Image (cartoon, helix red, strand yellow):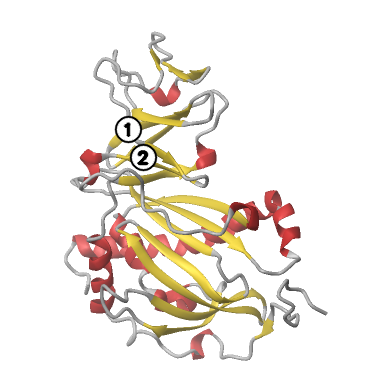
Amino acid sequence: MNDRNDGARWTAPLRRRRGPDWARQAPTWRQARPALIADALKRASTRPSGNWFVAGASQDVPADGRPAGRTIGGTEVVLWRARDGAPHAGPGACPHLGAPLRDSRVVCGTLVCHWHGLALDGSAFAGWTPYPVHDDGLLVWVRLDAVGGEEPSEHPVIPARPAPGTAVAAVFTAAGRCEPQDVVANRLDPWHGSWLHPYSFVDLTVVREPRGEEDDTFVVDVSFRVAGRLVVPVRAEFTAPEPRTVLMRITEGEGAGSVVETHATPLTAATDARPRTAVVEAVVATSGRRGFALARAAAPVLRPLMRFTAGRLWRDDLAYAERRRALRATGRFPG
């Protein structure tokens, strides 16, 4: 029986795990060297972002007459869609008397302030200047030059993804009391996976570490726990294409080509003593199996499950990031 278009012999995606229990797995603290993680984080921080920040999922900016409000880097932002679905973004305060535009309405693609009816069509008006905005089909990005402080770019750095018609995608969002670097550092420490998340990951081995700017990739062999001792083993790569993004791509095994994009968006200004950061994680799953067409058809049911899985992981990972930030604030973090 063949289940692949290339005629390869069908194999079951699940394996029965025979490895040790949590307490008997090999410690990873010697491999998870603080200096190595710090160097990877430093290299990521020097890559250009063009001042683009992920504002949320594309579906968070609806086309039904409601704007979306965000605070990014301490800057109030409002987003909405024109009649043709094109996104607009700009300062969140009305230029007339400062009304919160996130509470206003969109009428025929025009943002109408609910205090006095001032209409904004997305072009500059009375000192109100729009922000560049980009919808990549999954996420919405806003360019804030005053927040980013870099050389601006025309488009954000968007990782390559499976084609929309071949994948199931879901976006999860959470927030924590930390800075973007703490979220990125968490993702650049793959060694914690099977210790902090034993309900999801087992038998994790980092088979290749970054060797510098020209070879800045973590390669990991890991098994995703399905139920009990049933697992799905894969090989995955972790890279940081820009300062606030970490990309995990499955390169071998079930779901090869699937990606998890973790984006860290600062909510507070850089000078805020109590920083907050939003984690916007996009999971784009694909498979070469013919049966995956059924998964695509069941996408409306699968997306909440995908968000639930991401949320369980980020409950622990945000605690990691928040702890890292708290220790850094007191000068006690070893990195």
Which dot marks residue 142?
Answer: 2
Is residue 14 shown to the viewer in this render?
A: yes
Inter-mark Cα distance, 1 to 2: 7 Å
Q: Residue furthest right?
A: 1
Front one among 28 and 122: 122
| Three-letter amino acid code at the position of disc 2 | Val
Q: Which residue is mark 1?
A: 131
Q: Residue furthest top?
A: 116
Q: Residue furthest front?
A: 6
Asked if residue 333 is positioned above or below residue 299 in the image, the reply reads below
Give the percent coordinates (x, y) of residue 203: 53, 84
Few, some or many residues within 10 Å of mark 1 (<14, 14–19, 20+): many
Count of marks, rendered view: 2
Q: Are marks 1 and 2 in contact (CB under 8 Å)?
A: yes
Asked if residue 200 is positioned above or below residue 103 in the image, the reply reads below
Asked if residue 67 is positioned above or below residue 242 in the image, the reply reads above
Front one among 89 and 196: 89
- Picture quarter containing residue 118? top left
